[in-house]
Image (cartoon, helix red, strand yellow):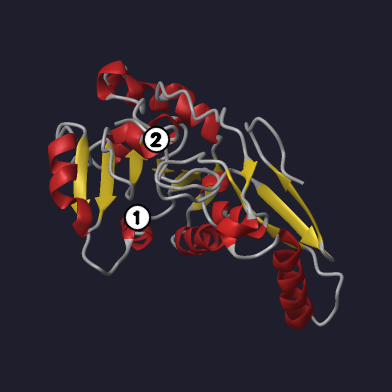
Amino acid sequence: MILKYDFASDLSKKMLVPLEESLRGLERSFGDLDAIVLTSKDPFISEYVPLENNPRFGATRFTGSVGDAIYFTEKFRKNHPSAKPVALFVDGRYHLQADQETNPQFVEVVKLDVEPNIEGGVQKTLTRFSNLKVGIDFERTSVSGLARYQEAIQAQGGTVQHVDGTKILNVLGLTGWNVNRPIFSLKESYTGRTLAKNLRGLSVELQNHAGHADTLHVTAATDDAAFLLNARGYHLPNAASFWHTLFFSRMSSFSFCRHAQRTVK
């Protein structure tokens, strides 16, 4: 049975260009760098991301919900002949699946335990080397995560620069994820709280936290607007929420929804 909002039409491997061709695209576009961090996240730091919008999938063909990768350019590999083009970092949930789905000719699977976590594993690998020029898509990395990468890499004499996520998807042969699903409101009988009660509650919490009523709250976490505005969109696999950037102050909110059929106010 296929439900109205499931993701049964998600990308399949047979629709992709060969992995070697995808990696050549990365090399042509970013060969001046030493390495690129390729995350499984989207610009909203979601865990479950359609494969069309997952740069780590494009560079490894690994379909798991969690796991990041590093692409090492030819410039780096000339000085480190044992390095494979891609290192894929996965935790215990995906050790077997990563081996099954990746090509060992191109991808080294780095199997992590509880510690370090995936970000820590990527960071540990990058900081084994000095003076690296590392590309990271700032939009697909949390603010705190980016700060940790910058601190660690710069401590080794390296530099971090932003690489455009849309360009990465294009050279990997991925289309990105264009949402064409409407956002709709839920009745109070479903949520147990009115929209006004939600807004009042957040307003009180912000005033208590900041000490005044003029605090501006900004969030792009997909669940935040869904629960605050009693609305749903099913824009991602395994989630009823929707892509948005939410601005809230003094009982007023505006949620800007990229690629959606309408905006909730």
Q: Residue furthest front?
A: 189
Q: Is residue 177 left or right of residue 130?
A: right
The total of numbered circles placed on residues is 2
Q: Nearer the viewer, residue 49 or 190?
A: 190
Label for residue 147? none
First-in-chain label (1 vs 2): 2
**Left or right relative to 3: residue 169:** right
Identify which amino acid the numbered label 1 is placed on.
Val
Amino acid at circle 2: Asp
Alpha-carbon span between mark 1 and mark 2: 32 Å
> In which quadrant of the rendered view does residue 59 lie?
top left
Which residue corresponds to the image point at 71% horizontal and 70% vertical from the top-left? 202
Q: Is residue 141 visible?
A: yes
Label 1: how many Cα within 10 Å (few below 14, some 14–19, many 20+) = many
| Residue bearing the label numbered 1 | 122
Estimate the x, y position of residue 53 in percent, counting from the top left. Answer: 45, 33
Say which residue label 2 marks: 6
Q: Residue 39 falls in which quadrant of the image?
A: top left
**C-beta proximity under 8 Å, tags 1 and 2:** no
Q: Quadrant of residue 22?
A: top left
Instruction: Kindly identify the residue that appears in the image at 36 percent across and 39 percent down.
Output: 56
Q: Residue at x 33, y 50 (%)?
A: 66
Kind of element beneath mark 1: helix
Look at the image and tell me in which quarter the N terminus lies.
top left
Q: Is residue 132 left or right of residue 227?
A: left
Residue 29 shows in this picture: no
